[in-house]
Image (spheres, rainbow, N blue to C red):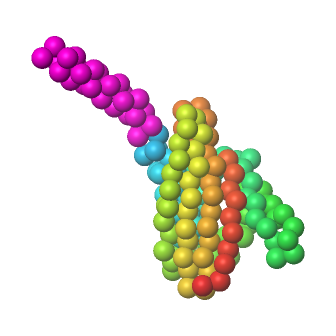
Amino acid sequence: MKTRVLVLLLGCVSAVALAAEQAPAGRDEQAIRAVVREYLHGLQFNDVPSLQRAFWPGASLFWVKKTGELGQLSQADWYKGFAGSAGKEEAGDLRIVSVDVAGDAASVKVQEDYEKSRYIDYLSLLKIGGGWKIVAKIYTVSPR
């Protein structure tokens, strides 16, 4: 009987400790998802202010060019590409595929399906000054 009570008590203590450990991570994941939803909104509606809220100002975007070379854009250069279609909605299915959080760092995989192409983004986020920001984006695109 004493053994059962001790095992039950240890199980309860472990469950409480695990719940306490996971609570901040759950809040962080919610905050990360909110930042990424802001990013997705910016993409879908060509909304630069939404993108600016999601990204750290010094963040860069990286991809592999058709030539096999590394492509890179600053935030300022990337935003220029939205000028001609600001506010126009893009038809597509944009979604968060996965979120991985470790302390003050996170990685998010995003999939964007458009009529003729599919983008896969890997977003690196850091918790800076108590808030999450995308600090880097790498992506690949393929025809559909």
The quadrant where residue 104 appears: top right
State the residue at coordinates (43%, 46%).
30
- Quadrant in which residue 63 is drawn: bottom right
Residue 29 vertical position relative to residue 22 in the rendered view, above or below? below
Majority secondary structure of magenta residues: helix
Q: Position of residue 5 (x, y in %)?
A: 17, 18
Tally the marks: 0
Q: Quadrant of residue 72?
A: bottom right
Q: Provide residue 91's location: percent of width, then percent of height.
A: 51, 80
On the question of residue 49 being in view, the answer is no
What is the residue that sits farthest to the left in this orientation? 1
Apparent side of residue 63 relative to residue 116 in the rendered image (left or right): right
Q: Which residues are magenta?
A: 1-27
Membership of 15 in magenta stretch: yes
136, above or below 118, in the image: above
The N terminus sits in image quarter = top left
Q: Relative to 83, say whether 110 is above or below.
A: above
Q: Residue at x 77, y 56 (%)?
A: 74
Q: Is residue 99 magenta?
A: no
Q: Position of residue 106 (x, y in %)?
A: 58, 44
Residue 114 visible to the viewer: yes
